Amino acid sequence: MYRTVKLQMKNIPGLQRFIALVATGALLAAAFIALPFVLLFGALMILTIMVAARLYVSYQVKQYQRRQNRGAPQGDTVNQPDPAAEHHNSILEKDHFKPRPHVGQVYDNGQY
């Protein structure tokens, strides 16, 4: 395959070869010049999205806190405390870890 490419290049006259070389060099130079700007644009877009997401989340948290502070109107059953949920929370808040002595074979020879 290399040989056919080499033969094709021999069939191209000198001026056309020079124009192809200049065009290729110009494209490579433009790509190298544009690359930092493309990367900078991408970084700025990521930063913009991050800031916008942070502002959106903070706005949503403020709305949620406002709704919580306002309290539920009388007769609203949505925000009434659920006894099952309170029981579940009390189970989660307790520390149920009770260390037990090891039972079984130990492969430690006392080296550690």
Image (cartoon, rainbow, N blue to C red):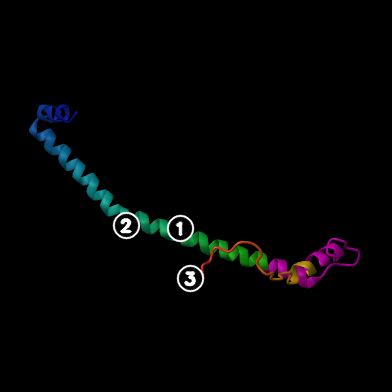
Residue at (21% x, 46% y) in the render: 26
How far across and down, in percent of the image, does residue 48 sit?
49, 61
The residue type indicated by label 1 comes to: Met
Which quarter of the figure has residue 86? Answer: bottom right
Which disc, if any, is residue 45?
1
Would you name the residue on which mark 2 appears?
36
Which disc, if any, is residue 111?
3
Circles 3 and 1, Cβ within 8 Å, touching? The answer is no
Q: Earlier in the sequence, mark 2 or mark 3?
A: 2
Along the line of sight, the residue nearer the viewer: 64 or 1: 1
Residue 92 to residue 32: above or below: below
How far across and down, in percent of the image, does residue 95 sit?
73, 72
Q: Quick check: 100 left or right of 39? A: right
Q: Quadrant of the N terminus?
A: top left
The answer to whether residue 96 is magenta is no
Q: What secondary structure is found at the residue carrying circle 2? A: helix
Q: Residues within 10 Å of mark 1 (few under 14, many from 20)?
A: few
Dot in front, 3 or 1: 3
Q: Earlier in the sequence, mark 2 or mark 1?
A: 2
The part of the chain drawn in magenta is 62-89
Q: Residues within 10 Å of mark 3 (few under 14, many from 20)?
A: few
The residue type indicated by label 2 comes to: Pro
Which quarter of the figure has residue 92? Answer: bottom right
Whole-number angstrom distance, CA of label 3 to CA of label 1: 56 Å
